[in-house]
Amino acid sequence: QQQVKQSPQSLIVQKGGISIINCAYENTAFDYFPWYQQFPGKGPALLIAIRPDVSEKKEGRFTISFNKSAKQFSLHIMDSQPGDSATYFCAASYESGGSNYKLTFGKGTLLTVNP
Amino acid sequence: DAGVIQSPRHEVTEMGQEVTLRCKPISGHNSLFWYRQTMMRGLELLIYFNNNVPIDDSGMPEDRFSAKMPNASFSTLKIQPSEPRDSAVYFCASSLFDRDSPRQYFGPGTRLTVT
């Protein structure tokens, strides 16, 4: 059962454009929604995260929009740059085992920003 | 801080051989996660430890896979016997429990090829 569905699989954007990646989840127990960025040959790294008590979080050019009723959240990259070209993973988590968060990842979106 | 350290970075082995992947988490972190990444299945959580104790191994594909964490600074993932379908990139991640910001730090990964 895929608990976090991510789309699109790949995305090509021109420099300066807006990149939008969408995710949907099923488990209403999820209470933490991070986005990870992965460059080729590297491990994923946390980019930005949100909790369901807010509808939007912005950090620089990166914004998460969250719709709790629709069980959807999205990543917006404003003024996309070639250096943003990477694979982006959404994830969802809830506290488990009493002291940690187990992440369920989407399948990833390969973003290419053309110069 | 050296980050999460994984070894080897690349491993090529023949079907039937034993493979051992190693991970050194960030000092002071109390949770450790093993993930497998493939094109088909994306990032999958195999097992995670909290304070050196395995909490959830439901993602371990079968009995050929085993993981240990003998102390807070070292963990191994063993595959015996290995099969071609085990070919993937294996990531180790660690975190320090923080309910407000449960961030996982990923290592660079071990690319395993089983021929």
Image (spheres, rainbow, N blue to C red):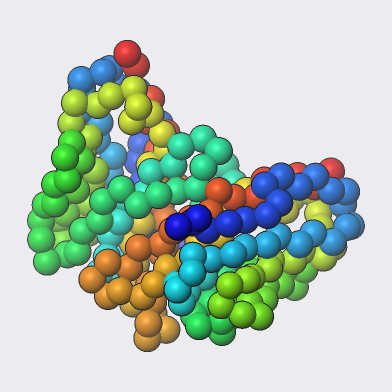
**Residue B14: x percent and y percent?**
88, 48
Q: Is residue A34 above or below residue B115?
A: below
Q: Residue at x 20, y 40 (%)?
A: A62
B58 left or right, relative to A102: right
**Residue B87: x percent and y percent?**
71, 48
For the N terminus of chain B, the image quarter is bottom left
Q: Is residue A83 above or below residue B72?
A: above
B6 left or right, relative to A15: right
Q: Is residue A25 above or below residue A111?
A: below
Q: Residue at x 23, y 71 (%)?
A: B100
Q: Residue at x 38, y 43 (%)?
A: A37
For the C terminus of chain B, the image quarter is top right
- The total number of labels drawn is 0
Looking at the picture, tell me which residue is in the foreground, A67 or B28. B28
Could one spot residue A98 in this view of the protein?
Answer: yes
**Residue B49: x percent and y percent?**
53, 77
**Residue A33: x percent and y percent?**
28, 59
Looking at the picture, tell me which residue is in the foreground, A36 or B42. A36
Quarter location, residue A41:
top right
B100 left or right, relative to B17: left
B17 left or right, relative to A78: right
Q: Is residue B24 above or below residue A46?
A: below
Q: Residue at x 50, y 48 (%)?
A: A43
Quarter location, residue B75:
bottom right
Looking at the picture, tell me which residue is in the foreground, B45 or B50. B50
Seen from this angle, which residue lies furthest front? B1
Looking at the picture, tell me which residue is in the foreground, A114 or B53. B53
Could one spot residue B87 in this view of the protein?
Answer: no
Seen from this angle, which residue lies furthest top? A115
